[in-house]
């Protein structure tokens, strides 16, 4: 049997998915449904001068053209719910002003999707002239302190300036990463269905409870009047963690049309209004002694945000927690551009931050003529350098040892360009992976049915990651029954409340809640309770006061990889990646492996191809579609050998499991950049590493 | 996308009778339907030609092969006659798109693929002379990393996206077309156009004409030494930054016949006749390869973001010549 915690149980929702019986948000059947298409601005700034709704209203099948001229006026100008992560500054047709190219400016509703699509394309809009900031370089002329979702924008300890001035070896470099867009396979989409003053939303989301709160506050209705359903999410990666414009627009349009409305974003509409990873510019200075011991760090980060919301990619986080430096100064600022507001994207902060830090560590290793793995071991942080607390559990040394051995790192000739095979320049690189361990309060219920089966419920989400499967395993093991006796249901605000499926915290929060509910049920059963019998369980979040927090909680990993680069043509291949992680207990060996592998595949994409390019005159994302915005295809992915060290982090939670959804992408870009340097002697500090940079 | 009428033609004559000013033929639809979704193409009427019996691949009396316009790309690439006589074409076909797309895409349709220029593809951009004649070119001063380095004009710097067409150009294919006034044969060199002042026209096909076949002349001497080398931003399923269709016929140590055509560099498959002439009769040594590579990019005028293509094109040509010629 593969039904205990940790076993490689095949995903329990698999059969429903491959037979088309798993309903995604867009697939719910609602009677009398009509279709909406969102219209976006084609200029980056200015006010809408005219919008010819009347002509479009006359087109076949059109029921409603909703613009700033006739949209319902919302309480607080539609800003009643602004409170990230769920509630963001969005575009709800409350004013004529345009703030970025691609901003939602109207919604057209018609009987059929085809009619709505044609009518939306026919809507003529003219704009008044206005200046816009569309070039990141120019935007940097005016900087503001960053508003952080995690960590502090500025931090100083010791005397970094003096320590760097006297450091024996110094690395002083600028690293850049571009705009990147999430592009989950399932586009964002919502069905809004009003019955009187009660609203049901079928929404593609990472956070049903967040959608309910945001919609109720934004529209000014009581939260208990809003139900949000999301049984399956076709990938989220952060962009479905916030409640973006289209969700409220769909509800507003449904109210105004007096009919249930479905609004699905078109793929190009996912480049702007639903967030992105912003450009990062990281000026990183490392100082070290001759023996490799780091003595100081300075890290100055600028990321652009929109002109209407201060959101910063927390790229400085790895600098604070990966290595110890007696002296440091970090400073994170934002610039303002006419763009859609950036957002959380798989491993925000650590993903971009490890590219800079782990590239710089490689540069330092070369400057010291030291093996880069040795340099990491010398600087291993035995306690969390950011607060001096002991780790709840950290087995990074074991990760380095295991992955290095499996990869064969000891056979590496460190000299760049020394491992050529025919036309291929071969390079080996390594890097460290890291991501914090998060958890929040979560609730679940467990019911014993009359037929002896169990129904477990939690208002959480499964983004394709395996929530259904691991929660079923946790319940089966806790109750001591076969997993086939368990039915786990999620994705409904009627179920016990669970947090956002972001920050890699679903398994670590909902898993213990499921366990608590099952223990409570067992207790009731032991006391003679008879079916149907229900019990609730709750897992606590971390203490509110950080001082109460005894341990530092973070996951780690070691990455080793090989690249091959065509010596003349610059084409890059990544035939092999070997990784070992320290993440606490892995709840399902199969879905867990997929999470790591998926993260590494995305890391390959980030390293070699992903880049959203803004047209500097219009602010439009020029490659805003999946033909020209490249992500890896099968042929780009070679062997990925993932492992994890035995670990049971019971200081962190009852299950001993830290989350694993995000760590997989961290460190990968640096590992590849380091391998590219080893292969070619060329240090690429701005992603992606496209072949033209190697010619 | 806007509403359109649809009729299915059962014969070439029916198709030709149905075509009109606002109508388009629909074959595999792998490009046209995308462009309609983006409101780049807005035909009032589509004439389905998928049931036309233009699906044969047959040898010609003169030792060549005639390929029906409705042969699917996958079928052509896998056909024994093509693999044996024109491996270059088979390779080029397989370098393009994905298996699913190749299973749908027709040979005639592949010739008529439209450019992947960002500014052409997104109707939200005001300026594109190809999409809206006279509106200007947003790409020339915009983000033009994937654009043309050869044969471009003030009005248009777009490239032709087809891999297949590059091999066809190298192989001196002839496009057979039919209109209401009868049949025409258009050599590949004349089929695609340079943009000049009328970039809205990709080809010399006249309104109402239908491609019925593509004929490849005999090229038995080139079959043994050929390569389609495609350089792109990922390992598969991406358009060429630069590609080279290269074929050689050797006579002892000397080049007897040479074919070089480049993709990803111009508004049409770029046949490098000067480079070919320079190679014929000479020994295939490093100097000859270097001269040929240089000649392939003679007159190149790179834009702000695509200067790398000049060097990349030279290196790709040199690599293909070395590989095909067996030069270490």
Image (tube, coloured by chain):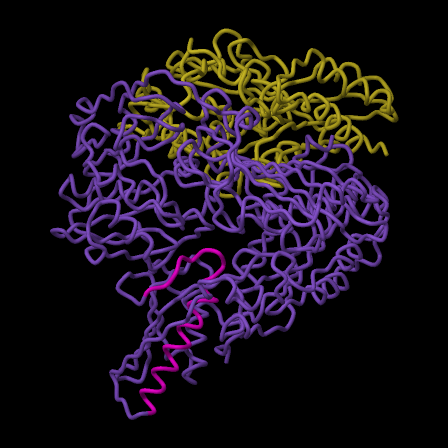
Question: Which chain appears purple?
Answer: A
- Give coordinates of residue B125: x percent, y percent: 42, 21
Residue A418 located left or right of residue A27: right
Visible residue check, residue B76: no
- Give coordinates of residue B13: x percent, y percent: 35, 22
Quadrant of the image occupied by residue B88: top right
The residue at the point 33 percent across, 70 percent down is A457
Q: Main secondary structure of the magenta part?
A: helix
Residue A77 is covered by the magenta coloring: no
Residue at far top of view: B197
For the record, the magenta segment spans A497-526
- Give coordinates of residue B248: x percent, y percent: 76, 26
- Give coordinates of residue B41: x percent, y percent: 37, 23
Q: Nearer the viewer, residue B265 or A234?
A: A234
Q: Where B296 falls versus B89 (above or below)?
A: above
The residue at the point 30 percent across, 82 percent down is A448
- Image quadrant holding the C terminus of chain A, namely top right
The residue at the point 48 percent across, 44 percent down is A182
Visible residue check, residue B70: yes
Question: Which chain appears yellow?
Answer: B
Residue A686 located left or right of residue A290: left
Residue A516 is covered by the magenta coloring: yes
Q: Where B287 falls versus A173 (above or below)?
A: above
Residue A129 located left or right of residue B5: right
Q: Where A442 falls versus A187 (above or below)?
A: below
């Amino acid at each position: 049997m593969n039904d205990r915690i940790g076993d490689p149980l095949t995903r329990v929702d698999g059969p429903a998915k491959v037979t088309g019986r798993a309903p995604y948000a867009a697939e719910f059947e609602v009677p009398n449904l009509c279709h909406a298409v969102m219209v976006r601005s084609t200029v980056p700034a200015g006010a809408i001068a005219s919008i010819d709704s009347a002509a479009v209203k006359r087109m076949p099948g059109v029921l409603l053209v909703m613009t700033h001229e006739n949209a319902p006026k919302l309480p607080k100008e539609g800003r009643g719910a602004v409170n990230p992560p769920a509630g963001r500054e969005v575009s709800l047709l409350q004013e004529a002003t345009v703030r970025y190219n691609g901003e939602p400016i109207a919604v057209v509703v018609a009987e059929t999707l085809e009619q709505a699509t044609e009518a939306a394309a026919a809507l003529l809009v003219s704009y008044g002239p206005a200046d816009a900031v569309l070039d990141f370089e120019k935007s940097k002329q005016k900087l503001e302190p960053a508003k952080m979702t995690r960590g502090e924008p500025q931090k100083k300890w010791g005397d970094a300036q003096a320590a760097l001035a006297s450091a024996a070896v110094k690395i002083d470099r600028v690293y850049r990463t571009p705009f990147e867009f999430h592009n989950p396979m399932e586009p964002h989409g919502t069905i809004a269905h009003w019955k009187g003053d009660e609203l049901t939303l079928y929404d593609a989301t990472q956070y049903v409870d967040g959608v309910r709160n945001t919609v109720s506050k934004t529209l000014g209705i009581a939260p208990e009047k809003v139900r949000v359903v999301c049984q399956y999410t076709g990938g989220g990666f952060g962009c479905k963690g916030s409640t973006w414009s289209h969700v409220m627009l769909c509800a507003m349009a449904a109210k105004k049309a007096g009919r249930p409305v479905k609004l699905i974003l078109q793929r190009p509409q996912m480049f702007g209004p639903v967030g992105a990873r912003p450009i990062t510019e990281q000026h990183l200075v490392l100082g070290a002694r001759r023996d490799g011991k780091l003595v100081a760090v300075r890290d100055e980060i600028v990321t652009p945000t929109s002109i209407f919301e201060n959101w910063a990619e927390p790229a400085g986080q790895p600098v604070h927690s990966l290595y110890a430096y007696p002296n440091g100064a970090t400073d994170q600022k934002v610039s303002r551009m006419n763009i859609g507001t950036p957002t959380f994207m798989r491993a925000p902060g650590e993903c971009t931050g490890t590219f800079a830090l782990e590239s710089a560590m490689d540069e330092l290793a070369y400057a010291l003529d030291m093996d880069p793995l040795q340099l990491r071991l010398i600087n291993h942080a035995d306690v969390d350098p950011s607060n001096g607390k002991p780790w709840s559990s950290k087995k990074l040394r074991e990760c380095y040892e295991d992955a290095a051995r499996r990869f064969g790192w000891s056979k590496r000739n460190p000299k760049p360009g020394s491992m050529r095979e025919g036309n291929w320049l071969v390079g080996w690189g390594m890097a460290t992976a890291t991501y914090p361990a998060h958890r929040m309060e979560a609730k679940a219920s467990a019911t014993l049915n009359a037929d002896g089966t169990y129904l477990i419920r939690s208002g959480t989400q499964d983004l394709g990651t395996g929530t259904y499967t691991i929660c079923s395993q946790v319940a089966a093991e806790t109750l001591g029954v076969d997993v086939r006796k368990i039915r786990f249901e999620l994705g409904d605000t009627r179920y016990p409340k669970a947090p956002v499926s972001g920050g890699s915290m679903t398994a670590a929060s909902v898993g213990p809640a499921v366990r608590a509910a099952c223990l409570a049920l067992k207790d009731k059963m032991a006391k003679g309770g008879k079916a149907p019998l229900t019990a609730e369980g709750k897992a606590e979040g971390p203490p509110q006061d950080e001082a109460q927090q005894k341990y530092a909680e973070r996951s780690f990993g070691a990455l080793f990889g090989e690249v091959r680069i065509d010596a003349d043509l610059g084409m890059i291949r990544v035939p092999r990646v070997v990784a070992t992680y320290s993440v606490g207990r892995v709840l399902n060996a199969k879905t867990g492996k997929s999470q790591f592998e998926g993260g590494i595949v995305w890391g390959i994409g980030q390293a070699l191809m992903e880049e959203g390019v803004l047209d500097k005159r219009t602010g439009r994302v020029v490659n805003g579609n999946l033909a020209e915005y490249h992500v890896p295809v099968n042929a780009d992915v070679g062997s990925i050998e993932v492992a994890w060290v035995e670990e049971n982090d019971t200081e962190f939670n009852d299950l001993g499991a830290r989350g694993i959804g995000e760590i997989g992408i961290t460190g990968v870009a640096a590992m590849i950049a380091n391998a590219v340097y080893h292969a070619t002697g060329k240090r690429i500090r701005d992603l992606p590493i496209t072949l033209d940079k190697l010619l | 996308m806007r509403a359109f009428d649809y009729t299915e033609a059962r014969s070439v004559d029916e198709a030709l009778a149905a075509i009109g000013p606002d109508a388009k033929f629909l074959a595999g639809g792998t490009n046209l339907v995308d462009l309609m979704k983006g409101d780049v193409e807005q035909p009032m009427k589509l004439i389905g030609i998928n049931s036309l019996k233009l699906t044969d691949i047959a040898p010609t009396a003169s030792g060549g092969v005639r390929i029906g316009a409705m042969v699917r790309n996958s079928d052509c690439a896998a056909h024994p006659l093509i693999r044996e006589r024109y491996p270059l074409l088979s390779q080029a076909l397989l370098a393009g798109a994905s298996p699913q797309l190749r299973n749908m895409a027709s040979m005639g349709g592949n010739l008529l693929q439209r450019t992947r220029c960002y500014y052409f593809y997104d109707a939200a951009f005001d300026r594109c002379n190809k999409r809206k004649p006279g509106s200007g070119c947003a790409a020339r001063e915009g983000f033009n990393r994937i654009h043309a380095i050869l044969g471009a004009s003030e009005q248009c710097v777009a490239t032709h996206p087809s891999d297949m067409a590059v091999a066809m150009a190298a192989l001196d294919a002839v496009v057979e077309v039919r209109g209401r006034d009868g049949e025409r044969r258009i050599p590949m060199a004349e089929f695609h156009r340079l943009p000049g002042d009328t970039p809205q026209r990709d080809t010399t096909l006249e309104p109402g004409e239908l491609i019925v076949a593509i004929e490849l002349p005999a090229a038995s001497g080139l079959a043994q030494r050929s390569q389609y080398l495609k350089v792109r931003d990922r390992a598969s399923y991406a358009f060429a930054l630069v590609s080279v269709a290269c074929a050689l016929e050797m006579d002892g140590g000397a080049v007897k016949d040479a074919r070089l055509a480049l993709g990803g560099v111009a508004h049409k498959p770029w046949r490098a006749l000067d480079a070919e002439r320079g190679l014929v009769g000479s020994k295939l040594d490093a100097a000859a390869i270097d001269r040929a590579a240089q000649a392939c990019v003679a007159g190149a005028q790179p834009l702000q973001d695509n200067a790398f293509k000049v060097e990349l094109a030279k290196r790709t040509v040199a690599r293909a010549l070395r590989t095909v010629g067996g030069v270490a």
